[in-house]
Amino acid sequence: MFHGFSNIFFGINPQNKFGILMKNGLLITLEGPEGCGKTTQCKLLYDYLKQKKYSVIKTREPGGTLLGENIRNILLNPDYKNIDILCELFLYNAARAQLLKEIIKPSLKSGKIIICDRFFDATLAYQGYGRDIPKNIIYSLDKIILRKILPDLTIVFDIDPEDGLKRALKTKDNKIGDRLEQESLYFHQKVREGYLSIAKSAPKRTKLIPSSQSIEKIHKIVCTYVEKLLAKKVKEEFGLINEN
Ligand code: TMP
């Protein structure tokens, strides 16, 4: 059983008033279809790491910056039903470029852990699989926008879209959902297929967790993956070996 490396980190790494910092920071992304519970898990993970004294920030896509949140309002507004799929693709990428510039790059540089509620995998799942935009277009934009910044760990929560949509709509005041939630079940099934395929094709970076378990159980599994990542980071940065 692995118990984490927080104390080792604590002994070696500079901890300022914001918490424990690493040399290059870490990017952890949480993904999945509507209603998969990722936002709840982002918060639980953030609290867990904060309590362990890590310097951690939580952000989301689309959004996380003033500009990005404004783009989010456009993207999720059901009044824009008629939005062109390429316009949609570029808006998601525009919000991402801004988030990278304002939040992700500087935070990685200063050694923080970033928890991001959705990132570039969402574009492949929603615009690639969901909207059938050719994957090579998505990949080309990834190359331009990300410039080699990839998540260190991506947790994909899996849920049947019918159950997920029900769950997502339950929390909405109007019970009809945003522009994406109002898409057909078929669209959301394709998105789910997209996520499953992403998880399969990048097994080192991504971990798939079924959302059918309790929030607490899922949180524990998430923490186990994150602790493993932190242990790997300690090894890489300080040459320490886990004897357990
Ligand atoms: P959420 O953050 O509440 O899940 O809402 C974001 C919505 O935007 C969600 O329906 C997924 C969708 N989305 C895309 O279609 N493409 C993307 O690249 C991202 C980041 C999100």
Image (tube, rainbow, N blue to C red):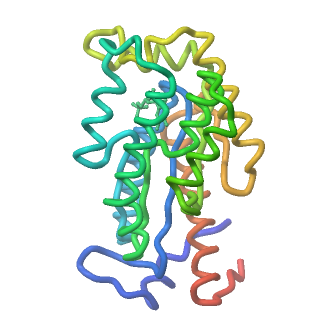
Residue drawn at the location 50% of the way across and 61% of the way down: 27
Q: Identify the image quadrant of residue 130.
A: top right
What x and y, as percent, mark residue 124? 61, 36
Taking 41 as reference, is 168 above or below it?
A: above
Taking 130 as reference, is 105 above or below it?
A: below
Residue drawn at the location 56% of the way across and 34% of the way down: 32
What x and y, as percent, mark residue 6? 48, 76
Residue nearer the viewer, 127 or 28: 127
Left or right side of 28 for 1: right
Q: Identify the image quadrant of residue 237.
A: bottom right
Left or right side of 38 for 191: right
Residue drawn at the location 63% of the way across and 82% of the way down: 236
Taking 182 as reference, is 235 above or below it?
A: below
Assign ligand 1 to one image quadrant.
top left
What x and y, as percent, mark residue 244? 71, 77
What x and y, as percent, mark residue 216? 49, 42
Residue drawn at the location 68% of the way across and 81% of the way down: 242
Residue nearer the viewer, 78 or 4: 78
